[in-house]
Image (tube, coloured by chain):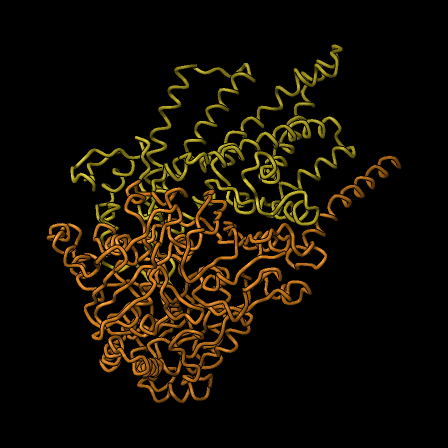
Chain colours: A orange, B yellow
Amino acid sequence: MFVRSLRRSAAVVLMLALVVPLLAACGGAPAASPTAVPTDTGSAEPGVLRINVGSEPDNVDPQLASFVGEIQYIMMAYQGLMTFDQDMNPIPGAAESVEVSDDGLTYTFKIRPDSTYSDGTPLTAKNFEYAWKRLANPKTAGQYQSLPCGIIKGYSEWSAAACQGLSMTETMALDLATLEADYGVKAIDDSTLEIELTAPAPYFLSMAALWIGAPVREADVAKGDDWWYDAENYIGNGPFVLSEWDHGNKAVWEANPNYNGPLGPVKLKKVEYFMISEGQVAFQAYQNGELDMLGISPEDLAAVETDPVLSQEIVNVTGSCTFYFGFNTKKAPFEDTKVRQAFAQAFDREAWNRDIFGNMGSVAYSFIPPGFPGYEPDLNLWPFDPEAAKATLAESSYGSVENLPEIKLTYSASARNNARFEWVAAQLKTNLGIEAVLDPVDPTAYTALTKTDPPQLFNLGWCADYPDPQNWISLFQTDGLLSSRVGYSNPEFDALVRQADVEQDAAKRAELYAQAQEMLVIDAPVTFTRNDGGPVLVKPYVQGVSEETITPIDYWLGFFNLANVDVQP
Amino acid sequence: MTAYIIRRILWQIPVLLIVGMMTFGIAKITPGGPFDTDPDRRQLSPAVEKILRQKFGMDLPFWRQFTRYMFFDFVENPKTGETELQWGAIGGNFGPTYSSRGNRTVQQELFEERSGKPSRFYYSARLGIQALIFAVVLGIPMGVLAALRQNTIIDYLILFISTFFVSLSTLIVGFLLVIVFAVNLNWFTVIADWQDPIRPWILPTIALGSTSLGFITRLTRSSVLEVKRQDYIRTAQAKGLADQIVIWRHMLKNALLPVVTVLGPLAAGLITGTLYTEIIFQVPGMGNLLVEAISKRDYSMITSGALIFVFFLGVANLLVDIAYGAIDPRISYK
């Protein structure tokens, strides 16, 4: 008996010996305990930047792609006619200079002399002509094909399916050869590209910096539908060359020795993209010195801020998105401007950003985010004020909360969002006395819903394509991309935007957009809540990546500051 | 026996058809479509969406979409403009993936070996087989040992370890392994370097095999315990057979039947990709791709994933049934 119980206790000791270290390791993980932080430089190498891009892109064909993770590849390998400086102004990229005719209709780009692709073959204006034609060609049917509709001469006519809504069969029946010949993009000679517009569009220079005009080569494209899948076909004129693409695992970029654009000369020898989809794993990899930069998830923020090492590595970046609550003005009670305004006043944005997002990003009262041209820091017409909100509601046609129909708060379901929108419902309850019903919807179904049958009250965002107020404000014109979701239409607003879009005087144009933005905030078809952004971790040995040099449209942190970025462990 | 195998294989066909139809149908009736991703960014213009729907045949009636995917259809070749016969899944063509905008097909994504890089299927299958071997090679001896030494420290220890692994999800075991062996001990890197033929495989194999290991150990143990009490074992011992012979010839052969039974579904699950292990250890396999396909509404990928899983399940079950015949002389197939 005694022997037996002795054996039992020995077993218990053994079990404990086995479990305790595991449990200890378990507890150490999320808390990012300082003891778990190994030597600072890890396995870093001089001139090699290692970042996590999260996942494998689905398609990196410049004229088809649209997602950030895809653009991140395209802009490494290719450079458009223009690019951006650190203040997000469009500057010549592959072009050496650009001349705009007095009527604002003809853009003449001069390609940098002796430009070549990374493999040494010459890059000429013809390559750009091919790329811009490929973008417009109705057979391409890319995600961004509709972006230049009505801007480039002949674009809408040729790209009839994307711009005019013709069916593919109808489009194919058109005289496509003539439409192509009438298209306003022409290589005059090897170094001159001329693009004609239908109306003045000062933001066209920003558009010319986008991935959609990346000069892919006809010979590469001809290699097959998924020509872009092999690193050896993905030959561009950008600052880096894709030297290895281990799909689903990593992509390795080496500096392009032939790059002659404004983002160079590049100090980095190599950039490695890793595809770690789980944030916790990436966090461990960063702490283990296997990544040089990392975005922080809201869940990890507290641990990072209290960690003596990690807290020193925080760099704050501004985002390129604005989030908002959309009020479907076709559905009661939001057809009434006063009701919408009351909701705008009843929402405590400061608390929302502080308590729910840990102050990542910033509070938004207007549409265009900080750092972008057109940002209006003082446009704050609906500060948080529950009393004023109640008063505004009393002025509405409904008179009081009791008369309002049921308010349903529709959102994209996820563990995070469920908690977040509980909070929003509590806000409405406390500040206006409204019992909102929560309506979580599967994320993909939610997107479809906001396009086809926008709910009464929903949450969405808009992220910049390019840094110009036109990319924001114009979307709220009648039947615009965003106004159609809330059924917003204001002829005065439309007139202002139409005028601004073609105005060639920069100051006057900015003023018109400012007026339009104010009108949008007053009409409140949506109420803006916050901008994304927030802290990221950057190892101290990474040079040239700081709050001053990161732009919100960087394809990775510091991309438009490439010439100054280096890794020196 | 041959007739039995052929009959079993033929039975796979209706099973695959039904699974294909149900998966395809459920995917299609789920709200939202492949062009409804990332609501905070520019969406496809309705016109371009219309073109793409046409390109993927989404404008066709449901039955036609399904037969195009599953069997064949006459489709216009965009290059020549001629109408051609195009085989579906039964011809090995699982169709273009929606997420690649039709630039790549499901079979390319899953099975294509390109530029010397193995396919996603290779990664998932190799990892699954390794994990299975790990679980079987360690699990069966541990189970037998625990049963033979019932109520001793060895038994308790083995029981504890196996219960521990069965209770923990792969996700947690995976993270534990990363934290202990990669972060604290620095024996491995957190980021896997798949050019290395051995190193990156070790931790995911253990993580993926751990639950099965615990399961097989426990199953073997209880099965051996039950056999141990049988009269024929006592008879064998009574007639003076050596312990080794009793264990190997009489005990194990009978005790392993239930273990073999579970190996079939276990193998199919492990081989066709397992999400958490692949995510934590960045295995470029099928698991992650198939799960992502659901939120992307990549219909062809979703349905193909289900078909491939069912196919392997069928094959594994067939192998198990054949193995039965070898182990148990009472079972014979006609």
Place residue B164 in its image quadrant.
top right
Q: Quadrant of the C terminus of chain B?
A: top left
Residue A506 horizontal/vertical position (percent): 31, 79
Residue B30 horizontal/vertical position (percent): 34, 51
Q: Is residue A98 above or below residue A490?
A: above
Q: Is residue A424 above or below residue A175?
A: below
Residue A71 horizontal/vertical position (percent): 39, 56
Place residue A207 in its image quadrant.
bottom left
Q: Is residue A353 above or below residue A277?
A: below
Direction from residue A508 to residue A169 in the image, left or right: left
Q: Is residue A435 above or below residue B94?
A: below
Q: Give me the residue at 42% from left, 52% from top.
A: A258
Q: Quadrant of the N terminus of chain B?
A: top left
Considering depth in this image, is B56 or A422 the residue closer to the camera?
B56
Direction from residue A210 to residue B330 in the image, left or right: right
Q: Give me the residue at 59% from left, 65% from top.
A: A301
